[in-house]
Each structure stands twice: as structure tokens, then as C-alpha cells.
Amino acid sequence: MEQINSLLEKYDNFKDAQIRSIQPLSDTSKVLTIVVQDDDGEDINTVKIEFNNITNSQILDNSVLPYMDMGFGISIIKEHDLYGFALGKGTAMLHVLNAPLYIVASDINIDEK
């Protein structure tokens, strides 16, 4: 969680960033790509979060993702040995499970470029 918390702090919870895609690797693994842009709309950082052993999720079609309101950023929490990713600001798995887009998995890998 230390790496995740420092990433969220570095990018201000990805407020006003853009979720580019969620690509399936298998039935229980997906890669979510988030892009941080400058004031001119140019991509300056790309972060890929790989979720493995997904136990629950609500995934939206990739064509909808650029239009999601990212004004409150994202949340990544750990509760009962599970990681929860969701749109918006939250601190509990209850928030995650009520978000319009969420993923619950037992393992997360982060690739920052």
C-alpha cells in the first residue's frame, strides 16, 4: 500500500486525469491505463495498473471511459487482503462497491511511465 499511497499522492488521486482503457488479460486479470495531461491536453504521464485475481468488478466500455468525471479522482484501498479500485474519493470497500466503475482484486501491479 505504501507504493500505491505515494502514487496517489504524487498525482493528487488522479483528479482530472483520463482513464484511457481497461484491457482484459484473462478472465481474472485486467490492465487499467490512466493518463495525466498538461493544461494543453498533451499526455505527460501514463500509469498502468494491473489487477490480478479479480473477485468483483463493474467495468464500463472503453468508448465511455474518456467521458467519465474524474473531478474527484480515484481511490485505491486495501481491506481484508483485497484491493479495491474505484472512481471518486473513498476510504472503504463500501465506497468501491457503490462506484460506477470499480475493480476488486487480490493483487495489483503498477507501471508508471
Image (cartoon, grey):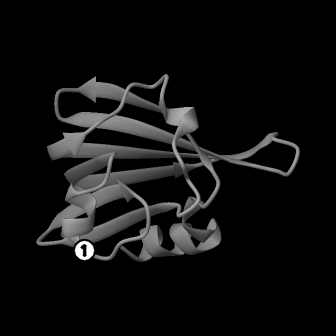
Does the image show residue 20?
Answer: no
Q: Quadrant of residue 90?
A: bottom left
Residues 3 and 69: in front is 69
- Lateral position of residue 81 relative to residue 87, left or right: left
Does the image show residue 85?
Answer: yes
Could you tell me residue 98's position as x and y percent? 23, 57
Task: Identify the residue at horizontal 45%, vertical 52% (top origin).
Answer: 110
Disc 1 crowd, CA 10 A, few/some/many (<14, 14-19, 20+) = some
Task: Identify the residue at horizontal 20%, vertical 57% (top origin).
Answer: 97
Q: Is residue 67 above or below residue 69?
A: above
Q: Quadrant of residue 66?
A: top right
**Labels in figure, total:** 1
Q: Which residue is mark 1?
A: 92
* Amino acid type, label 1: Ala
- Lateral position of residue 35 relative to residue 2, left or right: right
Query: In which quadrant will I find the N terminus?
Result: bottom left
Task: Identify the residue at horizontal 30%, vertical 35% (top origin).
Answer: 59
Task: Identify the residue at horizontal 82%, vertical 39% (top origin).
Answer: 42
Could you tell me residue 4's position as x and y percent? 44, 68
Q: Is residue 55 above or below residue 74?
A: above
Residues 66 and 6: in front is 66
Could you tell me residue 113's position as x and y percent? 65, 47
Q: Secondary structure at mark 1?
A: loop
